[in-house]
Structure formats: C-alpha cells, structure tokens
Image (spheres, grey):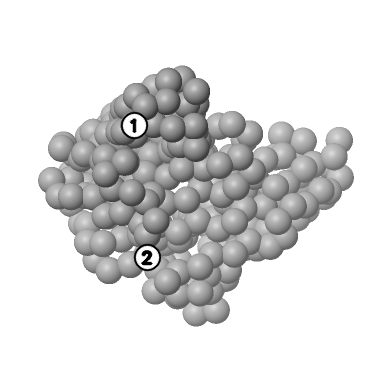
C-alpha cells in the first residue's frame, strides 16, 4: 500500500518555541493532505485540509496563525506549531489522498493513507 | 455538517466470538467510508475502504458493509482474537468536489478477553 511518512515521531520543546512536523507521501502524489490532532482517549479531530498549491482550509476553532500549514508540493505538507504552549501538547497525524481525479499513476479511490503520527510535548 | 457516531463506545468479548461494530453518519452524500484500527499511542491502520457505490468489502476475518441511504456501516469481525484489541474508527469522506472533508467517528474501544 501507499506510504506516508511523518517526521518527527516525537518531539519535546520548550514553551514559546516553534515546531515543524513534516508529512510526505513516499510513492504517490497527494493532491490533498489532512492534519488531525488527538487528545488522550479521544477520537481524531480534523484541524485543516490542505490542497497542493493553495491555502489550507482550517476547521472552526483552529487558529490559522498558530498552526501554519504549507503544502508546497504534491509529496510534502508541513505543520508548524508556532509559539507552542503546554496545551498544544497532543498527537498530530497527517493523511494524504488523491481525491480530485488526478491519478498520477494510481487509481483515484479516495483512500486515505496515514502517517504514523507525531507526539508533541511542550514543557 | 456531517456527524459520525459509533456504537458501542467500548466492547469486551471473549476470544473466539464474532462481533459487530456500528457506524452511523448523518449526511449520505459521501464518496467513501473507511474503517481503521488504532493501537494505543500509535497512528492509524487502514482496514477496509468501501466506495459509495459498493455495499461491502471483505478482508480476511473482517467484513464491512455500507448502506448509504440509511447512513449506516457495520464492521463484522469473525472469530475474534486478543490481537484484535484496539480502538476501531470509521471515517467518511464527503463534501463538495475540491473541498472534500474527512469526518471521523467517536471510535469503539474493543477488548478481546483471552
């Protein structure tokens, strides 16, 4: 199956610093990438949807200036948590898919492929 | 706004039993529905994907059905094993073309008792 690589898998940072998480589709070109966060014992919450080459669409309640998303290429999206605070500590997961009919050599099933997640701890 | 609900929230069954997990969604205009499992502290593993035009998919001991008109999907696990213990999530992909959104269910935490 398709592989999505997420890096780093875990990171610890001091309050006030910025942290960047990368999401790469390794063997296909993803037109759309989704970013989620998950608090302990809760389901995933969609933060934003990013389409290659355009600005990300943020869900209600998600601060776009705090969670910067860049999807500059068909294989890479980044999430930057700016001026991180302890309440930003969470498990962040990305997923990638081909949705809008641009198959790029793979069938357009709309199936989502997930990264392994990144655990952020802000001290 | 799409809402996805999974019942039950938690389930414990003895090893070897067959079981059914339920997923319901409020907006039937979906592209597909996907079932995942998540082990504690880990990412998601895709189990089955059902396109909106399909009614079921099977993989090994797993069978997922989709009734789009009624907004329901079930995941059937046959001959459960302790290794099946995990949280199971369903997710539907919907929204306007070019502005697709994935909505996750609340999850069912499954425990298989040896």
Dividing the image into 4 quarters, which one contains the C terminus of chain B?
Answer: top right
Residue B2, x across and y down, in percent: 45, 69
Nearer the observer: mark 2 or 1; the answer is 1
Chain letter of disc 1 in the image: A
Residue B39 quadrant: top right
| Horizontal side of residue B50 vs A23, given as left or right | right
Dot 1 crowding, Cα within 10 Å, few <14, some 14–19, many 20+: some
Q: Secondary structure at mark 2?
A: strand
Q: CA distance from mark 2 to mark 1?
A: 33 Å
Q: Which mark is residue A83?
A: 1
Above-or-below relation of B47 to B74:
above
Whether labels 2 and 1 belong to a single chain: the reply is: no
Position of A33 relative to B18 (above/below): above
**Callout 2 crowding tier (Cα within 10 Å): few <14, some 14–19, many ≥20:** some
* Residue A95 pos. (x, y %): 37, 42
* Tag 2 residue: B94
Residue nearest the observer in this picture, A99 or A38: A38
Residue at figure coordinates x 42%, y 20% from the top left:
A13
The residue lying furthest to the left in this view is A53
**Picture layout, residue B66 above or below residue A4:** below
- Chain of the residue displaying label 2: B
């Amino acid at each position: 199956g398709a592989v999505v690589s997420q890096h780093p898998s875990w990171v610890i940072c001091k309050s006030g610093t910025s942290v960047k998480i990368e999401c790469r589709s390794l063997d296909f070109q993803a037109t759309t990438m989704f970013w989620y966060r998950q608090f302990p014992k809760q389901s995933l919450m969609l933060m934003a949807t990013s389409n290659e080459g355009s600005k990300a669409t943020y869900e209600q309640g998600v601060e776009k200036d705090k969670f910067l998303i860049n999807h500059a290429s068909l294989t890479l999206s980044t999430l930057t948590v700016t001026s991180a605070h302890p309440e930003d500590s969470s498990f962040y997961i990305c997923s990638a898919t081909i949705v809008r009919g641009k198959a790029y050599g793979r069938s357009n099933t709309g199936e989502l492929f997930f990264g392994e997640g990144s655990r952020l701890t802000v001290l | 706004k799409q809402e996805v609900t999974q019942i039950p929230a938690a389930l414990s069954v003895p090893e070897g039993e067959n079981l059914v997990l339920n997923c319901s969604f409020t907006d039937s205009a979906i592209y597909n529905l996907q079932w995942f499992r998540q082990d504690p502290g880990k990412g998601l593993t895709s189990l089955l994907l059902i396109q909106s035009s399909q009614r079921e998919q099977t993989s090994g001991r797993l069978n997922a059905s989709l009734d789009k008109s009624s907004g329901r999907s079930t995941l059937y696990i046959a001959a459960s094993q302790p290794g099946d213990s995990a949280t199971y999530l369903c997710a539907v992909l919907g929204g306007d073309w070019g502005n697709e959104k994935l909505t996750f269910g609340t999850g069912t935490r499954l425990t298989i008792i040896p």
